[in-house]
Structure formats: structure tokens, C-alpha cells
Image (cartoon, grey):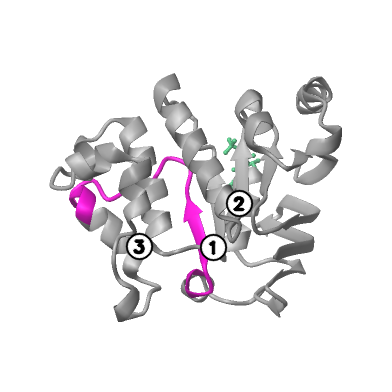
């Protein structure tokens, strides 16, 4: 269980996160929604430790990880699929996947089979350079790379952005599969509301750095979320 409690984050004088609290449980997808620039990426970057918090705390499996470095959080099982994929263009697909070995013990360093069953295209392109893949294939590679590190928390930043519909379906199937494994807490940042509504168990809508609306799957009303996102 990942718990974010009342966090505040600044870029210089500009406040990007204002008292944000959310939780992510294993076997559940927590969706964070909101327009451009409301602080969704800042929240994920705070979770992986790329920016220090001004105040508030982040706990994971009962331990306070607020002040851990990014590589220490990765070792604890926090995996990240960043916006824009950030794959290595000059490394092959296989080499990109193996960069996910970083936080693992030597004995655990193998590419799990489910990466290739979910994304067969990666198997057929193992020797191709990452930069030669289409945007959708790169997105699949970025998710595959995060799976290689056997995450306990998987943070995905707008995985559907700029991706063609058939690959969005594959990505949706992969997220459902990972959720159904039951041991991974997924945080999905999205602007594509239908995709989020299909997959989400819990929803938080952000505006100007704060969470301003939450609901669960049981009381999900997509029209209300859409209204909240537009306000
Ligand atoms: N490194 C940075 N330095 C200064 N300001 C930043 C930095 N990164 C983001 N911001 C600002 O912080 C605010 C929140 O940005 P953030 O990227 O977290 O929003 P977002 O909801 O993820 O938007 P998008 O959907 O466009 O990625 C924005 O006003 C943005 O301009």
C-alpha cells in the first residue's frame, strides 16, 4: 500500500502540489485525472523521488519513503512509466528492457515471459533500436521495461497520449492483466477519460495542484468526472 499524505511541492516560488493525499492499493488502479498543467506529472515525480517535497509524507508498505533517493525507491519496487516514454533511442529493445534490471538482485535478472505475451511485438523487435520503434511500440517498451523490475507499485503517466487506438487496447489489456495479478498497486495518470473509467477502481481529479474531487468505481459517474475536469 502506497499512501501519500498532504504533500506540498514547489518549483522555486511556484507551488505545483497543494496538500495532495492519495492512496494506491495492490490489485487496484488509482486514476489521477485533470487537464494539462494541474500537477499530475509533478505528483508522479514526487512519488519516484525526482523532486523533494516541501512538506507531507509518502509511506510504502508501512515505511516512510519521503526522503529516499529515486534508486532506493526503485529497489523497494516503485516502477515508473514516464510521459514521453523516455526509452533509450540508441539501445536495442532488449537492452532497453535490461535497463530494468538495475534495482534487481543478480539472481532475479531475467525478462519475465509476460512482457512478451502482453507485447509480442517486443519479442519480434528485440534487436531493433528503440529509436526506430513507433510511438506506440515505444510505449509498450516503456511498460515492459517497468515490468522487468517486478514493481509493487506501477506509476503510468498518460500511457495513451499520442497512441493509435489498437495499441491503446493492448495497453489497456496489459494494465488489467497487471491489476488482476493482485500484488501491484497501479497509479494511472490520464486525460483520456473513457480509458481511465474502464480500468479505474479509484479516481482523483486534480486542479491547480490540489485534489478537488474523488470517487470510487462503485459510485463512478463519468459525466461528473468530465464536468470536474472541465471546471
Ligand atoms: N521543472 C519544472 N519547473 C518549473 N515549473 C514546472 C516544472 N515542471 C512543471 N512545472 C509547472 O508545474 C505545473 C504542474 O505541471 P505538471 O507537469 O505536473 O502538470 P500535469 O498535470 O502533469 O500536466 P501535463 O498533462 O501537461 O503533463 C505547471 O504549471 C507546470 O508549468
- Say few, some or many: other residues with alpha carbon within 10 Å of mark 1 (under 14 / 14 to 19 / 20 or more): few
Residue receiving disc 3: 100
- Residue 71: give x, y in percent of width and height: 46, 73
Of helix, strand and loop, which one carries label 2?
strand
Range of residues picked out in magenta = 74-94
195 or 173: nearer the eye?
173
Q: Quadrant of the C terminus?
A: top right
Judge whether 88 appears above or below 133 on screen. Answer: below
- In front: mark 1 or mark 3? 3
Residue at 51% x, 34% y: name it. Answer: 172
- Say few, some or many: other residues with alpha carbon within 10 Å of mark 3 (under 14 / 14 to 19 / 20 or more): many
Q: Which residue sits furthest left?
A: 127
- Residue 46: give x, y in percent of width and height: 62, 60
Q: In which quarter of the image is residue 202?
A: top right
- Confirm whether residue 36 shows in the render: no
* Left or right, 114 with reference to 158: left
- Confirm whether residue 98 shows in the render: yes
Q: In which quarter of the image is the N terminus?
A: bottom right
Q: Residue 50 carries which label?
A: 1
Q: Is residue 62 magenta?
A: no
Judge whether 54 appears above or below 179 on screen. Answer: below
Amino acid at each position: 500500500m502506497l499512501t501519500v499524505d498532504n504533500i506540498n511541492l514547489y518549483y522555486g516560488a511556484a507551488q505545483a502540489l497543494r496538500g495532495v493525499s492519495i492512496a494506491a492499493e495492490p490489485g487496484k488502479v488509482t486514476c489521477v485525472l485533470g487537464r494539462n498543467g494541474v500537477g499530475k506529472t509533478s505528483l508522479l515525480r514526487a512519488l519516484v523521488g525526482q523532486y523533494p517535497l516541501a512538506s507531507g509524507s509518502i509511506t510504502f508498505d508501512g515505511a516512510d519513503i519521503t526522503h529516499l533517493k529515486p534508486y532506493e525507491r526503485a529497489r523497494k519496487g516503485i516502477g515508473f512509466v514516464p510521459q514521453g516514454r523516455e526509452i533509450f533511442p540508441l539501445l536495442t529493445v532488449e537492452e532497453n528492457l535490461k535497463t530494468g534490471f538495475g534495482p534487481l538482485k543478480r539472481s532475479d535478472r531475467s525478462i519475465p515471459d509476460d512482457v512478451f505475451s502482453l507485447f509480442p511485438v517486443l519479442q519480434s523487435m528485440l534487436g531493433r533500436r528503440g529509436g526506430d520503434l513507433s510511438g506506440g511500440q515505444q510505449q509498450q517498451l516503456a511498460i515492459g521495461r517497468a515490468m522487468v523490475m517486478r514493481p509493487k507499485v506501477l506509476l503510468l503517466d498518460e500511457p495513451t497520449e499520442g497512441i493509435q487506438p489498437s495499441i491503446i487496447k493492448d495497453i489497456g489489456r496489459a494494465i488489467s492483466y497487471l491489476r488482476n495479478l493482485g500484488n501491484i498497486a497501479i497509479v494511472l495518470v490520464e486525460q483520456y477519460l473513457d480509458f481511465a473509467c474502464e480500468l479505474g477502481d479509484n479516481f482523483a481529479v486534480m486542479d491547480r495542484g490540489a485534489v478537488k474531487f474523488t470517487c470510487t468505481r462503485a459510485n463512478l459517474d463519468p459525466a461528473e468526472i468530465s464536468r470536474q475536469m472541465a471546471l
